[in-house]
Image: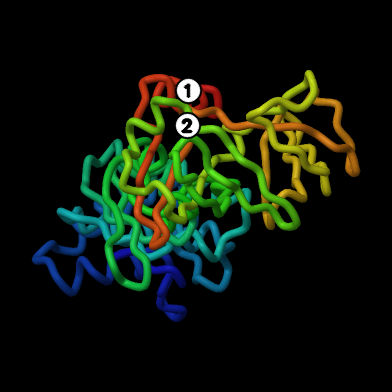
C-alpha cells in the first residue's frame, strides 16, 4: 500500500524504510534484501538517498521512497490511497507519469483512489465513480465521459465540468423549454433525439447537459436554435479560452484561443445535438452521446492533448 501521507519512519534511513517490510514478512537474507532495495531505488531514481533520513527529503522524494518500499515487496496488487494529493501541481504531473511508467514496466494491477477526476481519466484503464460510498458507474474513461449514467457522473467527469440547464419537454415533444437565470428559451429537439427519448418524458422536467467543448458560437446572428447571453468573464489559457456566460450559474464554454470576444460582449450560441445529454428529474440519463461522431471527436481530443 502507498499512503497519502508517505508513512515513513522518521528514525530510519531511506534504505531501512524500504527494507522494513521485507525484513518483517519475507525469509530473504540481508544480502538478498539489499539487492532488492538497490533494484527498487534505481528504478525510482533515489539510489543516492538510501542513507538519508525522511526529514532531509522533499515531498517528491518522500513519495518515491514510499513507492520504492511498495515495489520491493513485488506484490500482486498495489493499493494507492491518494498518493499525490500532498504534492504541488507540477510535481503531481511528474509523479503521475512516473506511476504510469512503473505500472507498465512492472505489470502489477493497481487500485488507485483519488478525488481528482483528471488523475482518474489519464491514469485509469477502468474507473469506478462513487458518491457517498455508493457505486455510480464503472467503465473505461472514454465510455464514462461519453455516456454518464446520471448527472452526478456527468458533472464529476470532465474539466471544466458539464453544464446543466433545467428544462421542460413540451407537450408535443418537439422542444425543451430551457430555464435561464432571468429568461426562458424553447430549444428545438432534432427528430433523432425525440426518437431516442420517446414519448414517456413529454411534459416532464428534465436537465440538459452540454460539455463546454460541445457549445458553439453562432456568428451570423440569432437563429431558431440559438441562445443569447452576455459574456461575464473571458479566461484565456493559451491554446484555448473559457467563456463564462450569464445564461445560468457556472455556465462555461470552451473556444479556440483566436476567438475575439471580450467581457461584456453579447453572443449567440447553440449546442451540438449529437453530443447532448438529457437527464430525468431524479438525475438518471435519458440521452447520452452514443453516436460515432461523438467517439471520433473525443478520440481526436485525447490524441491532441497527449
The answer to whether marks 2 and 1 mark residues whose Cβ atoms lie closer than 8 Å is: yes
- Indicate left or right for 61 with 284 as reference: right
Return the x and y of residue 89 as percentages of the image width and height: 62, 53
Residue 98 visible (yes or no): no
Q: Which residue is mark 1?
A: 297
Q: Is residue 100 above or below residue 35?
A: above
- Quadrant position of the N terminus in the picture: bottom left
Residue at the image position 68 percent from the left and 55 percent from the top: 250
Return the x and y of residue 101 as percentages of the image width and height: 38, 38
Residue 275 visible (yes or no): yes
Report how far apart the C-alphas of labels 2 and 1 lie in the structure: 10 Å
Residue at the limit of the structure toward the front, as seen here = 171
Q: Which residue is mark 2?
A: 275
- Indicate left or right for 179 with 246 as reference: left
Residue at the image position 18 percent from the left and 74 percent from the top: 24
SS of the residue under disc 1: helix
Return the x and y of residue 296 as percentages of the image width and height: 42, 20
147 or 138: which is nearer to us?
A: 147
Residue at the image position 41 percent from the left and 73 percent from the top: 8
Image mark for residue 142: none
Say how many tags the image has: 2
Q: Earlier in the sequence, mark 2 or mark 1?
A: 2
SS of the residue under disc 2: helix
84 or 188: which is nearer to us?
A: 188
300 or 193: which is nearer to us?
A: 193
Return the x and y of residue 150 as percentages of the image width and height: 37, 53
Amino acid at each position: 500500500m502507498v499512503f497519502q501521507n508517505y508513512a515513513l519512519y522518521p528514525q530510519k534511513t531511506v534504505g531501512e524504510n524500504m527494507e522494513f517490510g521485507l525484513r518483517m514478512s519475507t525469509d530473504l537474507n540481508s544480502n538478498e534484501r539489499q539487492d532488492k532495495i538497490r533494484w527498487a531505488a534505481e528504478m525510482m531514481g533515489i539510489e543516492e538517498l538510501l542513507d538519508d533520513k525522511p526529514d532531509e527529503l522533499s515531498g517528491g522524494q518522500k513519495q518515491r521512497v514510499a513507492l520504492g518500499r511498495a515495489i520491493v515487496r513485488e506484490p500482486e496488487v498495489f493499493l494507492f490511497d491518494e498518493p499525490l494529493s500532498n504534492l504541488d501541481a507540477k510535481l503531481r504531473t511528474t509523479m503521475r507519469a512516473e506511476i504510469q511508467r512503473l505500472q507498465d514496466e512492472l505489470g502489477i494491477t493497481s487500485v488507485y483512489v483519488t478525488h481528482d477526476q483528471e488523475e482518474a481519466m489519464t491514469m485509469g484503464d477502468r474507473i469506478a465513480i462513487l458518491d457517498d460510498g455508493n457505486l455510480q458507474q464503472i467503465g473505461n474513461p472514454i465510455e464514462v465521459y461519453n455516456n454518464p449514467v446520471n448527472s452526478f457522473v456527468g458533472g464529476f467527469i470532465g474539466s471544466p465540468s458539464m453544464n446543466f440547464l433545467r428544462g421542460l419537454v413540451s407537450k408535443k415533444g418537439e422542444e425543451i423549454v430551457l430555464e435561464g437565470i432571468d429568461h426562458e428559451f424553447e430549444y428545438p429537439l432534432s427528430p433523432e433525439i425525440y426518437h431516442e427519448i420517446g414519448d414517456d418524458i413529454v411534459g416532464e422536467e428534465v436537465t440538459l447537459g452540454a460539455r463546454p467543448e460541445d457549445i458553439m458560437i453562432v456568428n451570423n446572428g440569432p437563429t431558431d436554435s440559438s441562445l443569447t447571453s452576455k459574456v461575464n468573464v473571458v479566461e484565456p489559457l493559451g491554446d484555448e479560452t473559457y467563456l463564462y456566460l450569464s445564461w445560468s450559474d457556472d455556465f462555461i464554454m470552451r473556444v479556440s484561443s483566436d476567438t475575439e470576444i471580450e467581457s461584456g460582449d453579447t453572443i449567440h450560441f447553440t449546442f451540438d445535438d449529437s453530443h447532448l445529454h438529457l437527464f430525468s428529474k431524479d438525475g438518471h440519463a435519458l440521452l447520452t452521446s452514443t453516436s460515432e461522431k461523438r467517439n471520433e471527436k473525443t478520440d481526436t481530443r485525447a490524441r491532441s492533448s497527449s
